[in-house]
Image: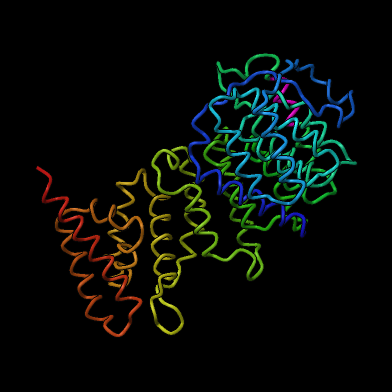
Amino acid sequence: MGALVTTALLVIAFAVWWIATPSLRSEAPARGPVSSLFRSMIPKALANNFGIPGDEVTISSEGADAQARLVDALLHGRFEEADRIAKAIIENGQFGNHEKQAVFHAALEGLKGRGKEQARILDYLSMLAPSSLTNDLVGELLNAFGSSELRAAAARTLGAAFIDPSPDGADQTPMARARNAAILDALRAGIASSDQNVAVSSLMTFSRIGPTEEVTAALLKIQARNWIDRTAAVRELLIQMPAANSAKEQVSLAKTIVRLSEGATPGELRPDELVFTTSQSISGSDIVIARISPDARQIIAAHMIKLEPPIADASGTVTPANARGYAEWLKLTTELTSSGIAEANKRAFAALQAADDPRRVVAVLAAISGPGFAGAVSPDELKWLRGQVERAARESHAAPLQAGMVQTATEAIAAAERERHLQP
């Protein structure tokens, strides 16, 4: 478990760095063959199984210097420095995508036998959509004698080499189809591994590109072994839902999610975790909601409605956590039972009126989506919301936390009123 956590933290840290440096993604990587400089690491039969050709790429003196510095930093545990060097390589406009990949391939060769460090290189390579590396990644994942870290990283990087199916896209070429099939088969084998790190990494990659029914079965199998928690399993199932091939598949996914929730032991999948995970996965977009069949939405909504969170804690205090939880729950349940965001806003307003609880109004308006909600209601409804916020202000004079949320709610009302005043 320690190795799994370490790897997960490494990937998360790298992802945060990547998100924080959008310039790295400005160059669209060109897909094409490039020499595999660490082909000797895997059996030749595996490496050549899919017949993907390779072109020798000469690394410039600048590339060789960057590769040497990268290897030295990793060999001596200077991981932040290694990340900076990798960043510079990826965003270097003087290097083509082939040479960038070749620099990292050479670094892999220089780190042979050091699985943890090679795994980090593969995570760098995944940013370059290295489809030409498929043979090597497949072989590395299937190499039962390889290090756990390197095999897990190979599984993660294979996802970047997969070409999403489309009716007339590049995946329709025989080579691309063979590559995609090889990736899926290797990930299936990885999921069956007795190594938890390898199995979970393979599963998380497979869940984004594999057939829905297979993904569901694999998630449940791995979750039953307690190799992933229920929250992670539910999150992956929710991600599957909008892209499922049929309404029948979506209904099946929805029922599986409900079963996982209902079968959770205390502390295993808390109601607030389920609401938050579901909201983050499918809420907030007409497009995403519209892709989920009404029957599947109804199954999830009926379960979520049972999980209405308390607006206050045991002492009667409305904390920010209580307020966020209620606002998230109301937004999610109304969107799931509506045909779009506009109808969901109407349902949310009706629910607030029926509750006649100013604390709930404050919770909704103080949420991130509060200004949008205030701006969507009619003038009379906005006037009613203001009256509820003023009522909450009178009743919360002795509750500093609630008073702060009242101020945020008041600002949301004021912003909506200014916007209406500016409109012609």
Above or below — where is 389 with respect to 56?
below
Residue for point 15% across, 56% down: 417
Q: Report if residue 402 lies within the magenta region.
A: no
Return the x and y of residue 375 as percentages of the image width and height: 23, 52
Above or below — where is 90 with respect to 220?
above
Q: Which residues are magenta?
A: 177-184
**Left or right of residue 40, residue 371 in this image:** left
Return the x and y of residue 130 as percentages of the image width and height: 67, 28
Return the x and y of residue 20 as percentages of the image width and height: 50, 46
Q: Report if residue 178 lies within the magenta region.
A: yes
Magenta part mainly helix, strand or loop? helix
- Report the number of discs: 0
Above or below — where is 130 with respect to 336?
above
Looking at the rendering, which quadrant does residue 402 occupy?
bottom left
Which of these two is toward me, 37 or 267? 37
Which of these two is toward me, 255 or 53? 53
Residue for point 63% across, 39% down: 86
Return the x and y of residue 325 as percentages of the image width and height: 44, 65
Q: Assign the C terminus to one quadrant of the image.
A: top left
Residue for point 61% across, 47% down: 14
Q: Assign the N terminus to one quadrant of the image.
A: bottom right
Which of these two is toward me, 85 or 229? 85
Residue for point 44% across, 78% down: 313
Report the residue that reaches farthest toward the left. 424
- In this picture the colour scheme is rainbow
Which of these two is toward me, 21 or 220? 21
